[in-house]
Image (cartoon, grey):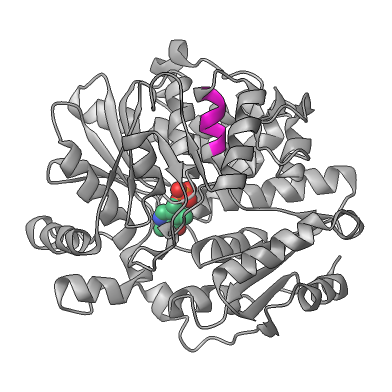
Amino acid sequence: MLYKSTRGGDSRLPFKETVLTGLARDGGLMLPESVPDLSGALGRLATLRYQDLAVEIFREFADDIPEGSLRAIVEKSYSTFRAPEVTPLVGVGDIFVLELFHGPTFAFKDLALQFLGNLFEYVLRENGARLNVVAATSGDTGSAAIHGLRGRKGVSITVLHPFGRVSPVQALQMTSVLDANVHNLAIDGTFDDCQGIVKALFADLPFKDKYSLGAVNSINWARVMAQIAYYFFAAFRAMERTGATQVDFTVPTGNFGDVFAGYMAAKMGLPIRRLILATNENDILDRYFRTGVYSIGAVSATISPSMDIQVASNFERWLHYRFGEDPAKVSAAMAEFKATGSLRIADGAIGDRWLSSGRAGTEETLGTIRDTWRGAGYLLDPHTAVGVTVARKAGIGDVPMICLATAHPAKFPAAIERAVGEDIAHHPALDALKGAERRMTRLPADARAVAEFVAANAL
Ligand SMILES: *Cc1c(COP(=O)(O)O)cnc(C)c1O
């Protein structure tokens, strides 16, 4: 399989190069040149355990890695999960909850970042190269990336987080990792400052090349690819248990990475009827799917902080398909968005045959956490609860409704206490972090200071 940029600049890149590149040189995102059709293989795939199913899917996209090596990478990546099924599907009342939080950092990002860590190590060992990853985080990405890359050969990771503005659990999950190749920077500023600094470092091409900077955010194709596997796994389990021939998914959404993986699964022939994306008050995507206008607003802080995003970078990948894979149309739309902060789909339908959207406010989300706890004895984290709220509004009918559970409730104990009136969201592994030794470096929100730090610590 070869890869191309959504904007037409890069093309015919093999998988391994695509993974190390991250963002395309023309500013676009990488996509496979064609979408594999697995509709004829569903019966066989439905019998496989998670790891074997993942290999069957990934080999379609990563055909420049020998299957034995791919299998070893997959087995190693999911051996760190606490659940033997990796992503168990649990019945909760009239819905199914897909638990994606059994990895090392208790959020769904582990599914992709455990895999990406092993993949980087494999590719770098093979070509004798090194990679210095630099990333900004508002919480979950940073800890998942650190736990994916800690101790790996040939790669270092520097994560910038806004000092005092990530949750106490999230800060501990990052700063208690003491491996020599892990560097935490606490920046005196906001998440936007952190992201601005990282962008400035990557935009300085001589600096980027000299220190071989690498990216781990969801613009990296390998992250999207890794997430396709659990859509297949969950749909098979739900159809097995109910006898249904199709399923609905609801996906709590920030950067559009997770729901885009579901969209790819649908294009590959998985019988998905509806793919519903759920936003909190930061609702740029919901407004798009209701009105056809994608226009940026101010970010507001909510109880589901990993979805407090206005510009959803992976939306460009979906637009590429929406525009009939015409890179000129994508480039024009992204240029319009950059210039005006807004873009309008002028021709034809707003969405496609699968995607629709909904939005849940803070009070209704807290209500869903409370009702699900009292009614079914199941504790939803606030991100998952946004999805469940939207799923209920969309209507649960004769097709199984699978709601993606993107984090463990113990990551967000304050929101849970606010919803149910008691401090009940705990996990021993997270509680044990409290006294842990930590290491971080505090720096001003200044790109020069961060560049000096990265240069001094680079491999
Ligand atoms: C990152 C994250 C999301 C949003 O996922 P996207 O791929 O950015 O849409 C939702 N919930 C949690 C807990 C997350 O960490």
Q: Is residue 119 magenta?
A: no
Residue at x 21%, y 22% (from the top left corner): 244
Q: Position of residue 27 (x, y in %)?
A: 71, 41
Left or right of 67 on screen, residue 54: left
Answer with left or right where residue 430 lies relative to residue 172: left
* Residue interval drawn in magenta: 316-321
Residue closest to the eye, 116 or 69: 116
Q: Residue at x 52, y 73 (%)?
A: 173
Tell me how many marks there are.
0
Residue 153 locus on image (x, y percent) = 79, 59
Q: Please say if 87 is above or below 385.
A: above
Using the rendered image of the protein, determine whether residue 124 is visible from the camera's viewpoint.
yes
User: Quarter-wise, where is residue 273 in the image?
Assistant: top left
Relative depth, front residue between 402 and 188: 188
Of 454 and 24, the residue lying toward us: 24
Residue 224 at x, y percent in the picture: 55, 39
Q: Residue 90: percent from the left, percent from the top?
A: 25, 45
Helix, strand or loop for the magenta stretch, by majority? helix
Quarter occupied by residue 378: bottom left
Q: Does 208 sit left or right of 56 as displayed? A: right
Q: Is residue 248 above or below residue 310?
A: above
In the image, farthest residue toward the top: 40
Question: Is 223 above or below relative to 344?
Answer: below
Q: Please tell me which residue lies in front, 448 or 102.
A: 448
Against 335, residue 425 (above or below) is below
Quarter of the image where the C terminus is located = bottom right
Residue 153: in sight, yes or no?
no
Q: Residue furthest left?
A: 375
The residue that appears at 53% across and 48% down in the rendered structure is 341
